[in-house]
Amino acid sequence: MDTPVTCPHGNSGYRTVEAGVLIMLEASHRDPLTKRAKITSVIFAVPRHVHSHISRRTTSELYGFAKTTVVIMSVALPTVIGFVIVMQAMLHTPVLITPISVPDSYQKSGYSSEAATQRLLDEIANLNQISLGGKPKTDVGDTNFLGEVASTQIQSGLIDARSIQTLIRRFFGRDIIQLSGEITLRKQGEEEISRLRLRRSPGRETLIDVESTEGPDGLFVKGAMNLLERIDPEIAAGIYWREYRDPEAAKRLLLVALTSSDPIVKKFAFNLKSYMLAVDGRIDEAQAASERVRSFGGDEFPADNSKAFALLNAKKFDDALALQLQNVNRFPKEQSTNFVLGMIYHAMGRYAEAIASYRRTMELDPRNSGVYQRLAISLRATGDTEGATEALMTGLSRLPSSPGLLYEYAEDMRRRNEMHAAVLSLRRAAVINPDNWAILVSLAEIEYALGHAPEATRATNVIRSRLANDEKPPATLRNRIDAVLKNSVKDQ
């Protein structure tokens, strides 16, 4: 039995050890060597004590102990692991989607419910990859993963995925958005139109409802962008402005992002607004928006980036350069500071320094689609056309679904008179971003140049239809659009 022992030198504490093994609390004036000897003796006594206990046990007793340990570990450990996995997944991925139901024709072409859902998730991932915004991206995850973890790892029945959602909502203030939906088909004349509808639960609110005549590829691309518009308008606005070069769509979504209650969303929405105002020549307003960014706290490089960009557009090159050099010195491993510095150097005609800044940006973030385009422009300004083409090809090898890169590569191929390579790149770009005027006009021009009458007519009809709906193309494309329309009249 345990024997309590009072410390002999007036110390009030005492300790007990099982089976009569006593640990005396030595007084401070004892010989240190004697103290260490006693501690060593006690330490070595522990394994001897354990061994004596085991040696007195029968085989059946030891087997029972081992079996109990295994059972406890097989139940408790997977539960803990499963809980952590699901918690981390839900915190990182606050939007979850269950398998989308698909028509028989999709099933036959290889798009089962699971495959169609995964393709939509892949397109969301592609959009996140091409986004140049500073705000963390919003991911969408497959609910099947959470269900599988919950069913295979959390077998004790103590917790499930739904209870974890409740914990996340209560302690982290985040809601898990769950989506479900279906793809349907309908005929309109000779065309087959695919329709994707996604609903948010609970409540069954329709989140997106989109149609496409471009088959599964076009539908998933369009559906992903529409979904991103609803769940993260700031990221979507940035993609429209920086990548798709559609300022009208960007402004529409930016207004939504600016009303968000999330301070992180608002911070980066004001930062994007500053860039857009600077491009429009509204420099004072752009700088005021940059100061709003600074007011939210946190890292200051986004605000300095947008302020330097405003100074650049005001043609205050020296001021812009001084500010951005300071920004790079403070945040040398932030790709965006080097990217903006490269833009300033290029505007000043200091192409070698611009190229060096862009290459540094590529090292820090090889998935920045804009840097390959900017690098190609700077290389071309130095007369290095081969280097410009290589830069674009490198970008496409890393970001094959970037419509901006696909368009710039097509234009590069046009300069080289490699029209077949150009049209293939533009067709891919048009599937990803069918609403972009520059892509559409270039595609119509090249299809006509190659004698592809049906394809050219299709692109021209889209242009004509959009004009009839009072859409306003960029002024820089107006003459090219008129020429495309005249060509279509000649061919009729």
Image: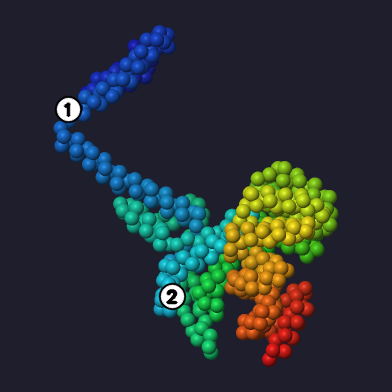
Looking at this view, is 60 or 478 the one in front? 478
Q: Looking at the picture, does residue 178 appear above or below residue 366?
A: below
Answer left or right for 375 relative to 218: right
- Residue identified by numbered label 2: 109
Residue 93 location in percent, x, y?
Answer: 50, 57
Q: Residues within 10 Å of mark 2 (few under 14, many from 20)?
A: few
Callout 2: SS: loop
Query: Residue 213 versus residue 41: which sits nearer the camera?
Result: 213
Q: Amino acid at mark 1?
A: Arg
In the image, what residue occupies the spot 78% across and 59% down?
A: 383
Residue 3 visible: no
Q: Tell me the crowding category of disc 1: few under 14, some 14 to 19, or many 20 or more residues within 10 angstroms, Cα based.
A: few
Identify residue type, mark 2.
Ser
Whether the residues at callouts 1 and 2 have beta carbons within 8 Å, the answer is no
Residue 444, horizontal then vertical, whole percent: 67, 79
List the single residue furthest toward the bottom. 492
Name the residue rendered at 38%, 12% in the picture.
Answer: 35
Total of numbered circles in the picture? Answer: 2
Under tag 1, what secondary structure? loop
Q: In the image, is 152 to the left or to the right of 403?
A: left
Whether residue 482 is visible to the viewer of this picture, yes or no, is yes
Kindly identify which numbered label has been placed on residue 56. Answer: 1
Q: Residue at x 44, y 72 (%)?
A: 111
Please, which colouring scheme is shown?
rainbow
Compared with 332, 422 (above or below) is below
Give the x, y percent position of residue 349.
82, 55
Give the mark nearest the N terminus, 1 or 2: 1
The picture quadrant where one finds residue 64 is: top left
Q: Nearer the viewer, mark 1 or mark 2?
A: 2
